[in-house]
Amino acid sequence: MKTARHGAHLIQLTKYPLAFPMNCFLVEEDDGLTLVDSTMSSPAEDVVALVKQLGKELRRVALTHAHGDHVGGVSGVRQRFPGVEVSIGERDAPILAGDKTVLTTEPQTKIKGYFVKVDWKPDRLLKPGDRVGSLEVLPSAGHTPGHVSFLDVRDRSLIAGDAFQTRAGIAVSGDLRPLFPFPAMATWNKQTALASAVALRGVGPSLLAVGHGDALSDPASAMDRAIERARRAFG
Ligand SMILES: [Zn+2]
């Protein structure tokens, strides 16, 4: 696993950086660490090693959405850190539990992507505006109906999950990049994803960290480019 530090509080861990990059993140807090996402299968060994190196306790796991390449590692992490609080957006909780029914109030497109059967339940369901340590929960539906992003209020770094990708070129969820098409192929509703991308751009992030690809600092113009591209692609 490859690691990279971004600013004062954020460490990115990348599994399979060359073949199929999947990111999870450690966020440093005064009381310990928050893990955001967990990659596909148990990354517990890598996370344990890094947590030990940092000399802090792992307190929380916060999930951007229910796809298997983000939640698959939670089981191993929970075994290694039994007191850890696991949270996910409230609308993605039933999807995580296997119910992929679209609500009557939602756009009637199919919930897509890779899911794993999980042997745990989230301890906490997140609503927009909630806080997980220093991370503010921002709604960012589209990739999945309950996708959330996390804004660190200390330095405005944004962990956007799959609302954007940067691998194979920056793109809004649903805008297919042929060299890394998987996030687009797993997107539930493109128009909703585009509206969320505009909203995330609007919070003025200092850094954009995503599920697949490198983080970008001062991402405003890159996010604008991606939004324009998506507008053209989605029609
Ligand atoms: Zn995803």
Image (tube, grey):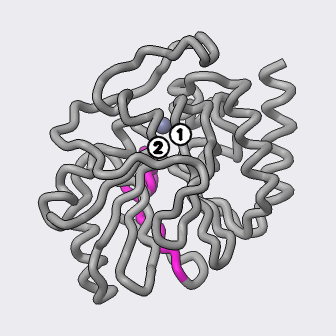
Residue type highlighted by circle 1: His
The image position of residue 172, as x and y in percent, is: 70, 38
The quarter of the picture where residue 100 lies is: top left
Reply above or below: 72 against 28. Answer: above
Whether residue 160 can be seen here = no
For residue 22, side relative to residue 79 (left or right): right
Q: Which residue is mark 1?
A: 147
Front residue of 211 and 83: 83
On the image, numbered disc 2 is attached to which residue?
Answer: 89
Name the residue located 19 percent from the left edge and 50 percent from the top edge.
75
Task: Name the secondary structure under disc 2.
Answer: strand
**Label 1: element kind:** loop
Residue 147 in picture, x, y percent from top left: 53, 39
Q: Amino acid at mark 2?
A: Gly
Quadrant where the C terminus sits is top right
Q: Does any atom of ligand 1 lie closer than 8 Å to the CB of label 1?
A: yes
Task: Determine whether 171 is above or below 137 in the image.
Answer: above
Along the viewing direction, whichever of 168 and 14 lies nearer the viewer? 14
Q: Which residues are magenta?
A: 9-23
